[in-house]
Image (cartoon, helix red, strand yellow):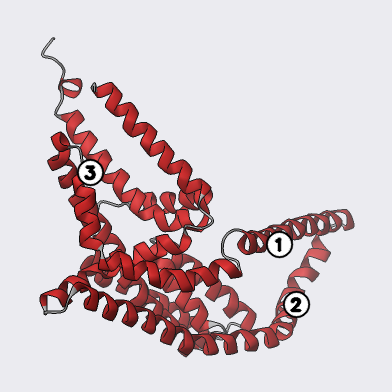
């Protein structure tokens, strides 16, 4: 088989794989989630094996512990978040009245400075934008309910994911050995080297960033709740978990907190509390957690992470979001490998001709 035929073979294989992922994206969620959990906790299984447990026993302990902690966290958090949401809904009329009172001087000033035609144009434009926003929100809710996160998908996620996690974690070493036997023999060593680099990059980012997100979720949730911000726990948890996308989670959380603070009346103590929480969180993330847990060696630029998440979500939905970072790490490692080969070739240096 010539090099051109081999390239065509691998290109067709990659294309078939992408088409299958796209066609099966509606049922892949629990399997991809189970694979992600198994990959995340695999080092723990290795440690338990070194302590004398069998692989099956170590897998059982880790799987049960992981999902038990998840269930306990949900049981503890859901009632608190539910109470905050109910309280927020009850206060919405008061927020609306307060915002209207704050906006009254501005509206009166506009009436004095603008003509009736200008005001009518502003009202029509505002109505058009409001209609667009409502349509977008309704469409988003419809997509969420019909795009793979509906009741049956959540049910399958809760039931199937632990099973997939258990079997993949138990057979992880066997799966790795099987895949290794499938590698083309004349390139096996180079492929192993690149796979180790992919694993280092992926583990460094995913495991490290996941730990960063959990710590920040706890910090922001407790901090914003103590400031007295309505929905502080929910906004804080989402801010911390959103830190998986660098800078985006903190920015969205800050905007949401400021908007709620304005609706609540904007007392100085609330503003100062929000500012202190986000300032400490930013320092904690940028100077302590990320350098210690993620480091600068993973080779995944924040812009590349954001692009991969958006592209994965647009192409494959929520499954694409879960696969985005692994795909980004694979592409990044292969790109660096290709650049190294290119910069060591005559295509880069020339063939010696002047």
* The C terminus, quarter of image: top left
Out of 3 and 217, give the one closest to the viewer: 3
Q: Are marks 1 and 2 in contact (CB under 8 Å)?
A: no
> What is the tally of numbered marks visible in this picture?
3
Question: Within 10 Å of the Cα at label 2, are there few (<14), some (14-19), or many (20+) other Cα atoms?
Answer: few
Q: Is residue 295 visible?
A: no
* The N terminus, quarter of image: top left
Q: Which residue is mark 1?
A: 138
Q: Does label 3 or label 1 sit earlier along the sequence? A: 1
Q: Determine whether the residue tagged by mark 2 lies in a helix, strand or loop.
A: helix
**Residue drawn 37% across and 38% down?**
14
Q: Is residue 327 visible?
A: yes
Q: Which mark is residue 263?
A: none
Q: Quadrant of residue 52?
A: bottom left
Q: Does label 1 or label 2 sit earlier along the sequence? A: 2
Q: Which residue is mark 3?
A: 182
* Left-right relation of 176 to 275: left
The location of residue 251, given as percent across then percent down, is 47, 65
The location of residue 12, given as percent across then percent down, is 38, 32
Q: Which residue is mark 2?
A: 100
Q: How far apart in space, not on screen, are marks 1 and 2 (Cα)? A: 25 Å
User: On screen, 354 above or below 214?
Assistant: above
Q: How far apart in space, not on screen, are marks 2 and 3 (Cα)? A: 67 Å
Out of 49 and 338, give the one closest to the viewer: 49
**Residue drawn 38% across and 61% down?**
246
Disc number lying in front (2 or 3): 3
Q: Determine whether the residue tagged by mark 3 lies in a helix, strand or loop.
A: helix
């Amino acid at each position: 088989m010539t090099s051109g035929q081999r390239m065509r073979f691998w290109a067709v294989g990659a294309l078939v794989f992408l088409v299958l992922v796209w066609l099966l994206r509606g049922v892949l969620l629990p399997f991809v989630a189970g694979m992600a959990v198994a990959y995340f906790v695999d080092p723990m299984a290795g440690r338990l094996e070194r302590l004398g447990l069998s692989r099956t026993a170590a897998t059982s302990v880790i799987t049960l512990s992981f999902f038990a902690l998840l269930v306990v966290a949900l049981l503890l958090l859901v009632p608190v978040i539910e109470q905050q949401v109910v309280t927020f809904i009850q206060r919405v009329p008061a927020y609306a009245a307060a915002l209207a009172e704050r906006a009254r001087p501005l509206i009166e000033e506009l009436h004095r400075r603008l003509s009736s035609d200008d005001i009518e144009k502003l009202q029509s434009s505002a109505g058009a934008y409001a209609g667009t926003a409502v349509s977008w929100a309704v469409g988003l809710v419809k997509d969420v309910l019909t795009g793979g996160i509906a009741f049956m998908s959540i049910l399958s996620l809760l039931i199937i994911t632990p099973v997939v996690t258990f079997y993949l974690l138990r057979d992880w070493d066997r799966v790795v050995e099987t895949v290794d036997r499938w590698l083309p023999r004349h390139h096996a060593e180079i492929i192993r080297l690149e796979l180790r680099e992919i694993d280092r990059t992926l583990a460094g980012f995913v495991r490290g960033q996941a730990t960063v997100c959990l710590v920040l979720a706890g910090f922001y949730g407790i901090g914003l709740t103590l400031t007295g911000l309505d929905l502080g726990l929910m906004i804080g948890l989402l801010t911390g978990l959103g830190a998986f996308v660098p800078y985006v989670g903190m920015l969205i959380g800050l905007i949401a907190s400021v908007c709620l603070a304005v609706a609540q009346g904007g007392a100085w103590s609330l503003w100062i509390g929000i500012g202190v929480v986000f300032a400490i969180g930013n320092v904690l993330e940028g100077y302590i957690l990320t350098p210690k847990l993620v480091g600068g060696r993973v080779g995944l630029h924040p812009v590349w992470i954001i692009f991969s998440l958006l592209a994965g979500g647009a192409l494959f939905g929520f499954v694409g979001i879960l696969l985005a970072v692994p795909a980004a790490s694979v592409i990044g490692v292969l790109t660096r490998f290709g650049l190294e080969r290119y910069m060591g070739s005559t295509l880069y240096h020339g063939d010696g001709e002047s």
